[in-house]
Image (tube, rainbow, N blue to C red):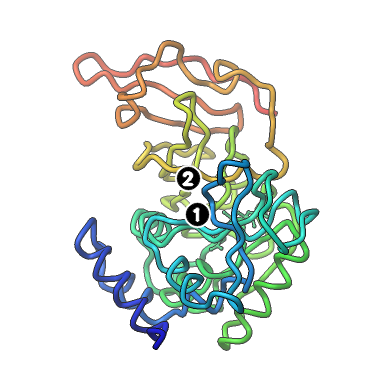
């Protein structure tokens, strides 16, 4: 007999407890309370291409047990859209992954670093399936939670899933790189799509002391999860807290700017990622290496976009 979703979810929690854990009680409770499977479409792609270069399709109606198991594998994201929806989910497929549900492990890592307080005013960029939005709502309630998704079909699906659980945060369909001034200033801004250049709107819309958490493209072949704190004077500073991989925001796919133009120093050792310091202002972004003995060697900030 197939294990009920609750059992599979609890097994996932045990596996994550045994690794890094949740770090905070509310997050563990939220993970147990929010049915991740409710947010995952019946047909999704497994993110590991086969020998033919195509990602296998997981179909809930055909293989419910395999589908449910995949939904709760701690380290596995599932692809929910390819080529902005041009590829129908009716078989194995190749193409650019344009929407997904992040793996449980990454979702937990991000929310742990976000350090949300009850009732915080939050902006999420990249609603995707709405799963992360539901976890956020568990902590903050829905009254002060705004989430933006650029793809209308993805946004509609997330709205239906969230409403199906009685959750009614402010859901917007549009370009999240502009943030959302209507509900600002935010205590927390969280991006679940990566950028090469931090949109200044995200800093402008934070309250002084507010936190921006985002995946930032790096010269190391992966993104860095960066946590920045707004100084109340138009700038935000912080550092990378983890190595991650995310899909890029639509407006920043395939950008041609070099890393130097994006404010990165040359000749970085990938092992130095934890020593980096990042500062963003209206004049652009600047990455420096914290020299623990002699202060930071700064690279001049490039002009903003
Ligand atoms: C990794 S998925 C988000 C996963 C989501 N948090 C979840 O729990 O399912 C990234 C999402 O960002 C969306 N996206 C890309 N560029 C965007 C933009 N400029 N504004 C808002 N959403 C964007 C994509 O359409 C995609 O759905």
Q: Is residue 189 above or below residue 273?
A: below
Q: Position of residue 44 (x, y in %)?
A: 61, 63
Q: Is residue 127 visible?
A: no
- Front residue of 239/43: it is 43
Residue 85 falls left or right of residue 278:
right
Helix, strand or loop at mark 1: strand
Do tag 2 and tag 1 residues touch (Cβ < 8 Å)?
yes
Q: CA distance from mark 2 to mark 1?
A: 7 Å
Residue 186 falls left or right of residue 54:
left
Q: Is residue 36 visible?
A: yes
Helix, strand or loop at mark 2: loop
Q: Residue at the front extreme?
A: 51
Q: Position of residue 172 (x, y in %)?
A: 71, 66
**How crowded is the residue under tag 1: few (<14 C-alpha within 10 Å), some, or many (20+)?**
some
Residue shown at 39% from the left, 60% from the top: 111
Q: Position of residue 227 (x, y in %)?
A: 41, 44
Which image quarter: residue 238? top left
Q: Residue at the right extreme?
A: 86
Q: Which residue is mark 1?
A: 207
């Amino acid at each position: 007999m197939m294990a009920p979703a609750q059992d599979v979810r609890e097994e996932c929690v045990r596996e994550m407890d045994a690794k890094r854990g949740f770090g905070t009680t509310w997050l563990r409770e939220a993970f147990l309370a929010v049915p991740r499977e409710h947010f995952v479409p019946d047909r999704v792609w497994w993110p590991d291409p086969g020998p033919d270069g195509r990602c296998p399709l997981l179909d809930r109606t055909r293989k419910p047990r395999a589908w449910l198991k995949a939904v709760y594998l701690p380290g596995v994201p599932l692809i929910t859209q390819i080529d902005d929806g041009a590829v129908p989910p009716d078989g194995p497929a190749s193409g650019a992954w344009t929407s997904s549900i992040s793996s449980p492990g990454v979702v937990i890592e991000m929310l742990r670093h976000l350090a949300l307080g009850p009732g915080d005013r939050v902006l999420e960029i990249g609603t995707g399936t709405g799963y992360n939005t539901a976890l956020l709502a568990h902590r903050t309630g829905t009254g002060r939670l705004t989430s933006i998704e650029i793809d209308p079909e993805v946004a509609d699906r997330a709205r239906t899933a969230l409403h199906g659980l009685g959750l009614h945060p402010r859901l917007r369909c549009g370009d999240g790189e502009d943030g959302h001034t209507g509900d600002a200033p935010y205590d927390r801004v969280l991006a679940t799509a990566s950028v090469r250049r931090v949109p200044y709107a995200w800093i402008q819309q934070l309250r002084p002391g507010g936190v921006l958490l985002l995946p930032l493209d790096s010269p190391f072949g992966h993104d860095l999860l960066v946590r920045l704190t707004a100084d109340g004077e138009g700038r935000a500073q912080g550092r990378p807290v983890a190595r991650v991989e995310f899909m890029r925001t639509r407006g920043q796919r395939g950008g041609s700017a070099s890393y130097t133009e994006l404010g990165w120093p040359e000749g970085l050792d990938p092992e130095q990622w934890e020593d980096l310091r990042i500062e963003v202002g209206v004049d652009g972004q600047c990455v420096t290496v914290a020299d623990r003995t002699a202060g930071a060697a700064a690279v001049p900030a490039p002009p903003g976009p």
